[in-house]
Image (tube, helix red, strand yellow):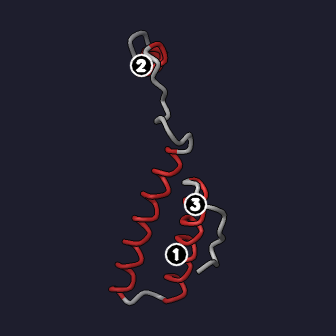
């Protein structure tokens, strides 16, 4: 760790936030980081599917990605408190 370097700056920022009563995790849902990540990944995968469809990609490859999207959507619903439904629920 260099004095005044990136690590020290990050530690100081965390300590400042803690002293100010702020948390590194947004208030409300303790899973907010995971929720944000899943929403971002789902959007990226949907765009990937759209591009693959336009390019005439292998339908099995597209279905595999769509399956992953459904799994991520199921996890997202659980994290948001939407109940427990699996990737095969319609």
Q: Nearer the viewer, residue 83 or 68?
A: 83
The first of marks 2 and 3 along the sequence is: 2
Element under label 1?
A: helix
* Residue drawn at (53%, 42%) of the image: 29
* Residue drawn at (52%, 75%) of the image: 65
Percent x, y of residue 25? 50, 34
Q: Quadrant of residue 2?
A: top left
Q: CA distance from mark 2 to mark 3?
A: 34 Å
**What residue is disc 3 on?**
82
Q: Nearer the viewer, residue 11 or 73?
A: 73
Q: Nearer the viewer, mark 1 or mark 3?
A: 3
Element under label 2?
A: helix
Q: Nearer the viewer, mark 2 or mark 3?
A: 3
Q: Nearer the viewer, residue 54 or 35?
A: 35
**What residue is disc 2 on?**
13
Q: CA distance from mark 1 to mark 2?
A: 39 Å
The first of marks 1 and 2 along the sequence is: 2
**What residue is disc 1 on?**
65
């Amino acid at each position: 760790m260099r004095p005044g370097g990136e690590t020290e700056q990050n530690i100081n920022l965390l300590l400042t936030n803690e002293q100010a009563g702020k948390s590194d995790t947004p208030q409300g849902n303790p899973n907010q980081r995971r929720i944000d990540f899943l929403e971002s990944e789902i959007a990226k995968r949907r765009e990937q599917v759209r591009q693959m469809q336009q390019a005439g990609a292998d339908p099995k490859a597209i279905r595999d990605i769509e399956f992953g999207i459904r799994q991520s959507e199921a996890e997202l619903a659980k994290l948001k408190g939407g109940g427990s439904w699996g990737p095969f629920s319609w």
